[in-house]
Amino acid sequence: MANAPTKPTTPVKKESSSASGLFATFTIPICLVVAILIFIFILGDASHYEGGDVEKGVPDLLGTVHRGGIIVPLIMTYLLTVIIFSIERFVVIGKASGTGSVDAFVRKIQAHLNAGNIDAATAECDKQKGSVANVIKSGLKKYREMETDTTLDIDQKTLAIQKDIEEATSLEMPMLEQNLTVIATLVSIGTLTGLLGTVIGMIRAFAALATSGAPNTTALSTAISEALINTALGIGTSAISIVMYNVFTSKIDKLTYAIDETGFSLVQTFAASHKSK
């Protein structure tokens, strides 16, 4: 009976995992295509170069980014991916938090538990919705089951409630961490790709010096521009990735703490109320 409350939610979580996997699979290639199109048709437009000469004209800001070379659309792909995945995580974690403040919800549940009003606590879960409410509602159902169970002693009942909360948490919380690995990976890849662009740019700069009798200022400026632009874009993308990753892990930790705090209160309330009888 301990697993009964969680069985109906299992297929939903599997579907959510599959949908999230498909989202990640299709998002990155689409971002790459979009980045290439932006690089060619927007950044590479002749209007961004003096006299409309893409090869020799003096570029404006967007033209300078275009001069960064073939590494630029790759780093732009990373940036677009971070933005899209961040929006997706904001939506998912927002839904998991529920319709109201998580802190206020926890306080209400604890107040109902202290008053011994399990029905009111369950009603609060129905109002709040989200992952935290789902886990606590599962624990409250098990609480009711254990009140009528005559085959187990108090310690076994308490352990059963705690186990049910842990099982419900294991179904709810992993969904919140999906796609965070992508953002975390981009933290390192963004910087490394920028450094790769820097190396490529410097190789071209030295090659221009080696093959010309006199320094070719145009070739040198193009190569150095490529090196600096890629470095700047790579570091900027990594910085955004770090910030977003920390924001989401902080939100998830807050939800996890809310579940742990409320679950502990639920178990302690059951143990205290039934040991006193």
Image (tube, grey):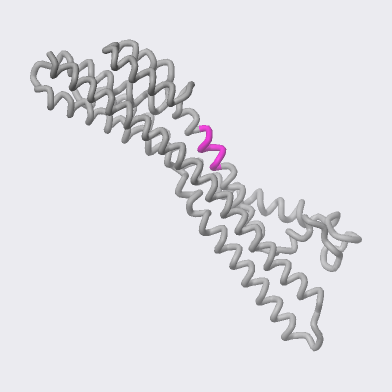
Q: Residue furthest right?
A: 51
Q: Quadrant of the N terminus?
A: top left
Give the residue displayed 56% in from the left and 61% down from the top.
191
Secondary structure mostly taken by the magenta-highlighted segment of the chain: helix
Residue 235 drawn at (x, y percent): 60, 58
Residue 93 drawn at (x, y percent): 47, 33
Query: Does the segment drawn in magenta span residue 240?
Result: no
Find residue 270 and report its image quarter: top left
Question: In the image, 49: left or right of 205?
Answer: right
Question: In the image, 153: left or right of 175?
Answer: left
Q: Which residues are magenta?
A: 85-91
Q: Where 128 sits versus 32, above or below? A: above
Find residue 86 and report its image quarter: top right
Give the residue displayed 32% in from the left and 32% down from the top.
260
Q: Where 236 sits versus 100, above or below? A: below
Q: Residue furthest bottom?
A: 213
